Image: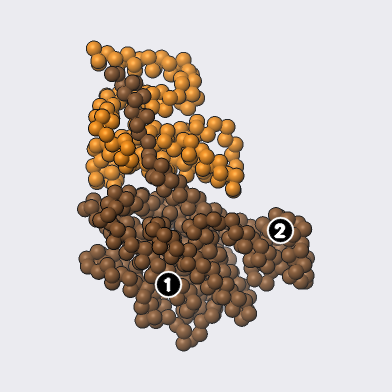
Amino acid sequence: MWLGDKLQKLKKGINLSEERKDNILSDMLRKIDAGAALRGREAERRISKGSISIINIFKKMPVFAAILVAALLGGGTSFAAQGTLPGDLLYPVKVGFNERITEAVQFTPQGKAAVESQIAATRLDEAAQLASQNKLADNWKNVLEANFKLHADAAQKNIAEINSGGNSASAVSLASDFEASLRARHDVINQLQGSSTVTIAEEINDTIKLRHEAENNIASNTDQNTGDIKNSAKEKLNTAANVLDSVQGYFDNLNVATSTLADAQNKLDSAKDIYGQAQAKFIAGDYSSAFSLAQDAIRAAQEAGISVNLQSDLKLKGPFSVTRHGDDDEEEDVPPVINFGATASSTVSAGASEDSHSGDSNKGGDDEKERKSGKDILSPLNSTSTPFQVKVRGGEGSDD
Amino acid sequence: MDNSRDFFITVYNTHADKIYRHCLFRIFSPGKAEELMQEVFLKFWQYLEGGKEIKNAQGLLYRIADHSIIDEKRKRSAESLEALVEEKEFDPSSAEHSDIETKVLYNEAIGELKTLREEERDIFVLRYVDDLDPKEIAELRGTTANTVSVQLNRITAKLKAKLI
């Protein structure tokens, strides 16, 4: 048989399994959605700037009129509302219409968890933006905090359902993405206000517990499904490599002062070290540990990217700033104070995070020593850590 | 977004296996082929999202795959997971295709493909794995169908001569 015939015969027998194809598609769609969320924030800023005159015209109108206008004008208004902040005329359209619609069209726990996570993060971004403009009034603090908690709890509920439904790998990914998102925002807000935010810290700890539960599920099922965990670990390693490359690529193109990038690069290098450990575990056949470590690397890189993205959005200056070339002539901003539901007595101490990694103790042994290995990426929440650990920018959730 | 997403899913479901096989027979590593397939579709999405008109989704996928494979070959010297685990044997994740006959046939085919020059191998894969006709291959390669036909005839003669 000549080669042409061999290839013709072979190709009929070489396909990916339907399950594998579905997993790859799900992974890609998650990356696509994460990318869309990032670009959405960019678009929001552009729309917000372009809509100022329209918003000013209607600024004196009551809220119900705004919703009526939205209904009459249709999609354009809904789109314009996306970039609004609390206090803006169209903000009720964003929260009461746009977000409700987005929630309503999610038919899977995965989709619901992703959307609720994103909305919770949006509330924190709004608080940070308002604070940076010295417009975070007490009434809005309370509303934003309550709404943040509502959506964060909804996200966690869906993640818990996914885990109990047997899809622990998906639950780990979603919990890890949400954790990175919250940690990054917690750090930024914490640094801005000089004290911690109890509600965010609590939600982070709850999310960490969910992730640990899902990881433990994966570990306990390893013996029964070695092939599955091997594929999952391999897929996770590939995703981690892509995320690390993306963040590194962003660093390389950020065009900022070397001193600004130093800490960020350290953080990313630590993530790369963890990825190396994940590779070693994979080669040694310890696929469960490889999976967890790869997820840790993804989360660390994501956290770095989101933190700097936020700093850049807020145009923060100061010791934990992102300095873009060409920004030198801009006015110095006074770091804003965000008192987002926190009081002096509610500062999260190291002890309060009893849990950020309490689940780790379940794993124990050398694996955990390697995972922690003195790197602050995986350290529990601790508001007493003063240096801003992340100063680079990357894409959110490019992972899975 | 929803229309683009639906289109993307349809294109993926239609072409995923073809692109996977194309990558597999160009770089001979099932794991890396899977990675490249995903990369190809994500780039396709970026193209789609950019609002560019797509007249021939399959053609675009193969063009993206070509670029990705070239990039991959350039990076080959770098340490990779596949290099570390040394995926020398065909071990597709799908159990239904892991029969002995397929493995033997695959390894023979890979051995023979490796005797071809890279450019010859690429055209041969496009013709006999991807089932593209000379005109479609010519469009991908920016040449004429006649040139592709001549190249294919030479490759065929070269391979058949080895059987005698």
Q: Is residue B144 above or below residue A335?
A: above
> Quadrant of the rendered structure where residue A92 is?
bottom right
Residue A280: give x, y in percent of width and height: 24, 54
Residue A46: give x, y in percent of width and height: 63, 57
Residue under circle 2? Answer: A77
- Determine the residue positioned at 60% across, 76% down: A143
Q: How many marks can you see?
A: 2
- Determine the residue positioned at 27% across, 39% down: B91
- The secondary structure type at the circle numbered 2 is helix
Using the rendered image of the protein, determine whether residue A319 is visible from the camera's viewpoint: no
Q: Residues within 10 Å of mark 2 (few under 14, many from 20)?
A: some
Could you say which chain is coloured orange in the image?
Answer: B
Give the quarter of the figure containing the N terminus of chain A: top left
Q: Rounded to the nearest whole Å, what is the CA distance between mark 1 and mark 2?
A: 36 Å
Chain letter of the residue beneath label 2 in the structure image: A
- Determine the residue positioned at 47% across, 67% down: A156
Between discs 1 and 2, the one toward the N terminus: 2
Residue A339: give x, y in percent of width and height: 54, 80
Chain letter of the residue beneath label 1 in the structure image: A
Residue B48: give x, y in percent of width and height: 55, 42
Please name the color used to draw chain A.
brown
> Quadrant of the rendered structure where residue A223 is?
bottom left
The mark closer to the camera, 1 or 2, is: 1
What's under tag 1, amino acid-wise?
Asp
What's under tag 2, amino acid-wise?
Thr
Q: Is residue A340 above or below residue B115?
A: below
Q: Is residue A56 above or below residue B121?
A: below
Give the quarter of the figure containing the C terminus of chain A: bottom left
In the rendered structure, find residue A185 and report the number of the disc placed on it: none
Residue under circle 1? Answer: A206
